[in-house]
């Protein structure tokens, strides 16, 4: 049984990590979050120590390490705000543990370089949750692309709208310096998926970038991709709004929809199983997607270049 600590226990994604730790037969021994609304822990690990102050959490983990001859916890699961991931990964490695970090791993590609050096020095690993790579529909699409080996590039439209209330822009998620912008916060796992399926990124054009919307054109080795991301409810197609839907997700390849609306419930557990077996997605696997979203954040939009997503005419 492996011992886990978790940072960001009150966050949206933390319960999936708690479930994955439990489902793989391991133990959560300590958790941290400045917000104390963490009753969800009782559903998984009611005996876990809990802290609202990093300093006390740090001291607790260090005391455990010293009492157990330098090997107290095996993994630190990181579910904290995006801009803190780098620091919390470093804490995990300094504590003698591997890090398991939610996406985006970091905000900028040069952060990957620094973490790579620390990974080498510490002898511990940095693993990341890239769960779309494990989704059966995405795996099948990748196999299809590899099997067909055609010369013409695939034509792909990616649309993801996940509406958020007024709170969103008042939270850390609405700040580029903390969340990395819409493309980073809600899109990075899709950009990783595109790289996973269609190969290396060759061109990155930005058509729109605001606090609530982002759109552009990406060209990969095997695909030309028009993409549109939004957290604005009004962007959801009217028929879906009339049905009461607040989220719209669509990926088409050569005009055919890729169905992946289901199959998400156990992907974190699958990711943990692979990590525990030593087959997880390591640090360097993040570089293409992190580079893409970093460029999007820093590029002045130019709607005159490259193919535009159909939704842009509606904004």
Image (cartoon, helix red, strand yellow):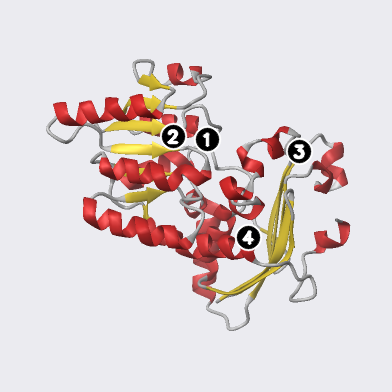
Residue on which disc 1 sits:
13
Left or right: residue 187 versus residue 36 is right
Q: Choose between 266 and 140: the one closer to the eye.
A: 266
Label 3 and label 1: CA atoms lie apart by: 19 Å
Give above or below for 36 relative to 117.
above
**For the view shown, which residue lies furthest in the front direction?**
55
Label 1 and label 4: CA atoms lie apart by: 24 Å
Sequence-wise, which precedes: disc 1 or disc 4? 1
Q: Picture coordinates of residue 175 (x, y %)?
A: 64, 45
Judged from the image, the secondary structure of the residue bearing numbered disc 2 is helix
Q: Picture coordinates of residue 268 (x, y %)?
A: 45, 40
Q: Choose between 197 and 108: the one closer to the eye.
A: 108
Judged from the image, the secondary structure of the residue bearing numbered disc 1 is loop
Identified at 55% across, 43% down, the residue is: 263
Label 2 and label 3: CA atoms lie apart by: 25 Å
Give above or below for 307 relative to 179.
below
Residue on which disc 2 sits:
17
Q: Picture coordinates of residue 215 (x, y %)?
A: 72, 61
Judged from the image, the secondary structure of the residue bearing numbered disc 3 is loop
| Cβ–Cβ under 8 Å for marks 1 and 2 | yes
Disc 3 or disc 1, which is closer to the eye? 1
Residue on which disc 3 sits:
246
Quarter where residue 100 is shown: top left
**For the view shown, which residue lies furthest in the bottom direction?**
151
Left or right: residue 246 versus residue 196 is right
Identified at 74% across, 76% down, the residue is: 306
Judged from the image, the secondary structure of the residue bearing numbered disc 4 is helix
Sequence-wise, which precedes: disc 4 or disc 2? 2
Disc 4 or disc 2, which is closer to the eye? 4
| Cβ–Cβ under 8 Å for marks 4 and 2 | no
């Amino acid at each position: 049984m492996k011992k886990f600590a978790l940072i960001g226990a009150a966050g949206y994604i933390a319960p999936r990590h708690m479930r994955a730790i439990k489902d793989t037969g391991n133990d959560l021994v300590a958790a941290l979050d400045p917000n104390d609304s963490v009753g969800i822990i009782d559903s998984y690990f009611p005996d876990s120590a809990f802290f609202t102050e990093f300093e006390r959490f740090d001291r607790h983990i260090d005391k455990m390490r010293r009492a157990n001859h330098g090997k107290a916890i095996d993994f630190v699961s990181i579910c904290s705000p995006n801009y803190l991931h780098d620091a919390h990964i470093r804490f995990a490695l300094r504590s003698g543990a591997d890090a398991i970090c939610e996406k985006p791993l970091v905000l900028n590609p040069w952060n990957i370089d620094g973490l790579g050096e620390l990974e080498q020095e510490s002898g511990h690993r940095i693993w990341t949750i890239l769960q779309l790579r494990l989704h059966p529909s995405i795996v099948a699409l990748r196999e299809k692309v590899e099997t067909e080996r055609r010369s013409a590039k695939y034509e792909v439209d990616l649309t993801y709208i996940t509406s958020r209330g007024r709170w969103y822009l008042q939270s850390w998620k609405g700040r580029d310096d903390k969340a990395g912008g819409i493309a980073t916060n809600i899109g990075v796992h899709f950009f990783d998926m595109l790289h996973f399926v269609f190969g290396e990124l060759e061109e990155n054009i930005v058509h729109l970038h605001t606090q609530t919307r982002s759109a552009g054109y990406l060209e990969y080795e095997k695909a030309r991709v028009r993409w549109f991301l939004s957290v604005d409810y009004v962007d959801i197609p009217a028929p879906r709004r009339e049905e009461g839907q607040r989220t719209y997700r669509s990926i088409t390849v050569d005009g055919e929809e890729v169905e992946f609306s289901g199959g998400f419930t156990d992907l974190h557990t699958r990711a943990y199983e692979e990590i525990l077996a030593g087959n997880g997605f390591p640090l360097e696997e993040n570089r293409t997607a992190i580079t893409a979203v970093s460029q999007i954040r820093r590029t002045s939009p130019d709607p005159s270049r490259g193919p535009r997503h159909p939704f842009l005419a509606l904004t």
